[in-house]
Amino acid sequence: MTVDDSTAESIDSVTLEVFRNKLESIAEEMGKVLIRSAYSPNIKERQDCSTALFDADGRMVAQAEHIPVHLGAMPDAVAAVTAKDPEPGDAYILNDPFEGGTHLPDVTIVSPIATESDVIGYAVTRAHHADMGGMTPGSMPAGATDIYQEGLRLPAVKLRSGGELNEDLLAMILANVRNRTERRADLRAQLAAHDRAEDRLRSLIDEHGRDQVNQAFGAVINYSQARMTDELTAFPDGTYEAHDVLEGDGVSDAEIPIRVSITVDGATVEVDFTGTADQCAGNMNAPLSVAKSAVYFVVRCITDPEIPPNYGSYADITVTAPQGTVVNPTPPASVVGGNVETSQRLTDVVFAAFAEAAPERVPAASQGTMNNVIIGNRDRGGFTYYETIGGGFGARPDKDGMDGVQVGMTNTLNTPIEVLEAEYPFTVEQYGFREGSGGDGQYRGGLGLVRSVTIETEAVVSLLTERRRRRPQGAAGGEPGAAGENLANGEPLPAKTTQEVEAGTTITVRTPGGGGYGDPSKRTADDRKADRLDKKVSDDHEDQ
């Protein structure tokens, strides 16, 4: 699909670059305001949030470098709001996964930005709130079988109208969540980011005029599409397929097949998930918007990273999936694990399919999970802690994988030990690299992490994890990375579980390593020596 935007024709290349950077800086500044204003560690420390600017037609123009699974799904949220005919001064809130959301803890706010009475664009924020109600603290119950168990579900409704906060709606939201003081502060932080976006975009219009800003919107979109066209046409035409599985859904341990077929035809890419399993009883169902996010992320990874990420960079990519499948479920399916874990497997299979077309651009498998840990108590005003834990990045065709990083559809920081122990009734027993967990190869897979925390009070612990049975695969002869492990007081825990625990319980998560790349016998002696000195390999690798 070619973007038709004749308003962009009069923008020269220098002016285009100036506007591109200004628009991206607005999105980045929105993120800074949100992070610095937030109250919860999940947003202010881990930066589990995303911000973006859209034009009046609902096309993404600029985004901050935040969370892939948020950003790729934002267009569907904006479409849900524009269907309501928003007016200047309005701000819509939503988290409904069947109306542009991803899962209930991810709360999106969309507000129009106007000059006088005309909407010129939209500011969008999405932030993972540490609790949105539901059957367990943290709103991510491992055994949920419908969305009503996962928390408060919000269609697109006005949080602000004509610039005035809807106090009745806010009161209703706060009455249904835990730690209402934290939720109120985080929502106000999102609104502050919107106010900053409006100030900055209006200043840009005052400086350059509405018409030129409109032209710039179209120009940056066309520029991205033109560059993406050059990248995609370099791939050989053909159909490429891959498949993988999820390790159960929290209700059953039965594996859930994920299949993809990718057809490249010139600059167009059609991604079809036909053959993927029907939607499951548990919470590993992923809305179609999440599947789109996974595809857009992979395409961006295997093309020029300097292409500005906006509507133009994915305009010629089509994503389809049969309704009623685990990647396009129908209500009232539970979805909280689909956003965080199924999204990772979707990333894996799309990478694997593209590896047939461009093997030199695709790494070995990374850890393939977010290792979600949710801990809270049921007391009124109690705590809710959420964390995704990094692991091994897959080795690349020309270098080792990275150790202990977030991969795939998440891009958060960790919560520092000092913050964990100050904010929550926790004692951190261990936090470090998991020795020997990376897959061997000419290039070694990245190491997983070990995080061990003692909970000093009675609590509810939920774990949503993957790659506990199937190891992240190597590539081109490389060996797989280590599978992950979950433990309570040293005893194994299921990959997906919600449990009441006593005070003094120690929860340990050992995250997967990345797969290796290339024949291990080709790894140089110097690299082997460095591996041993840095304790990157276990003793049984020493003589290889």
Image (cartoon, helix red, strand yellow):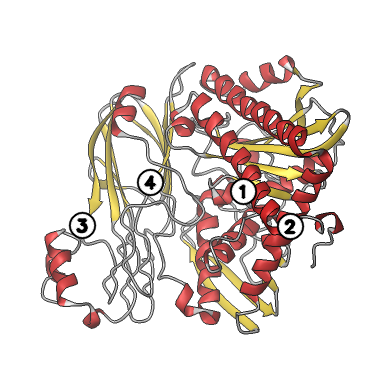
**Badge number at residue 12:** 2
Local SS, label 2 = loop
Foreground disc of the pair 1, 4: 1
The disc, 1 or 4, on the residue closer to the chain's N-terminal end is 1
Local SS, label 4 = loop
Q: CA distance from mark 2 to mark 3?
A: 53 Å
Q: What kind of residue is marked 4?
A: Ile
Q: Is 442 left or right of 55, judged from the image as shown? A: left
Q: CA distance from mark 2 to mark 1?
A: 28 Å
Q: What kind of residue is marked 2?
A: Asp
Local packing at callout 2 (Cα closer than 10 Å; few below 14, some 14-19, many 20+) is few
The disc, 4 or 2, on the residue closer to the chain's N-terminal end is 2
Q: CA distance from mark 4 to mark 2?
A: 45 Å
**Badge number at residue 71:** 1
Residue in the image at 82% along x and 59% along y: 9
The disc, 2 or 1, on the residue closer to the chain's N-terminal end is 2
Local packing at callout 1 (Cα closer than 10 Å; few below 14, some 14-19, many 20+) is many
Residue in the image at 53% along x and 45% along y: 66
Q: Which residue is mark 3?
A: 435
Q: The C terminus is located in which quarter?
A: bottom left
Q: Which residue is mark 4?
A: 389
Q: Is residue 487 above or below residue 108?
A: below
